[in-house]
Amino acid sequence: TAAVYDLRRQNVATTDPAHPNFQIQIGEVASRGFEFEAVASLTSNLNLTAAYAYNDARATRSNDGDAGKRPVTTPPHLASLWADYTIREGALNGLGFGGGVRYVSASAGDWDNTFDAPAYTVVDAMARYDIDNWRFSVNVSNLFDNQYVAACLVLAQCNVGRVRTVIVRVSYCW
């Protein structure tokens, strides 16, 4: 799948020139870019998913002097790759496992674009076992427990990324 877009978000809050401690909704942010995702069954056991997105977002109207600058928490590049393998025969029939990597490029750390929140990459993994109508699964996000800055609003207000997260799930389908 693929998409190309040119979006405008209006009524973005910007400083009120008559009352500098207040904001009014007359700002605008434009986002232009494209996304694509490819899903392939390489064999009857192996699936692959790859995705990439490019987003050129800029303030186009503002009272804050940031017109033309990148909005905070909006990285221009996102990419991911995921592979999933399922055993379909023999004693291990129904056992599946997978892994992938997610990349997020650097994003503006403040509206003046004086610094960037750094790019980061995390690895995820999964194991599952399907038997009859039951599925037992374990998903791990940020497998190697990388420490990273997910985004910043200003230099003194940055959000740390999620630590390793393990989710165990048992489900039944009928």
Image (cartoon, rainbow, N blue to C red):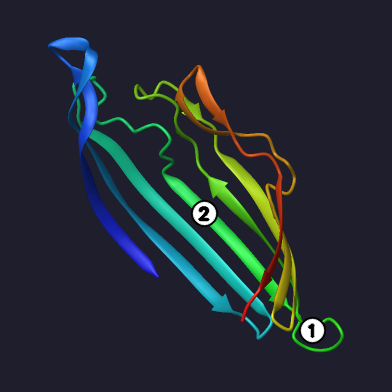
**Tag 1 secondary structure:** loop
| For the residues bearing labels 2 and 1, Cβ distance under 8 angstroms | no
Snapshot quadrant of residue 14: top left
Q: For label 2, count other residues whose C-alpha is less than 10 Å away and answer few (under 14), some (14-19) or many (20+).
A: some
Q: Nearer the viewer, mark 2 or mark 1?
A: 1
Q: Which residue is mark 1?
A: 93
Residue at (63%, 78%) from the top-left corner?
173
Give the camera-side residue of 93 and 117.
Answer: 93
- Position of 123 relative to 66 (above/below): below
In the image, is 11 to the left or to the right of 148?
Answer: left
Single out the residue that lies furthest toward the right.
91
- Position of 75 relative to 101 (above/below): above
**Tag 2 secondary structure:** strand
The x, y position of residue 113, in whole percent, is 38, 25
Question: In which quadrant is the N terminus drawn?
Answer: bottom left
Q: What is the CA distance from the residue labelled 2 to the residue labelled 1?
A: 32 Å
Single out the residue that lies furthest toward the bottom.
89
Question: In which quadrant is the C terminus drawn?
Answer: bottom right
The x, y position of residue 42, in whole percent, is 62, 80
Label 1 is placed on what type of residue?
Answer: Asn
Q: Which residue is mark 2?
A: 79
Give the camera-side residue of 115 and 153.
Answer: 153
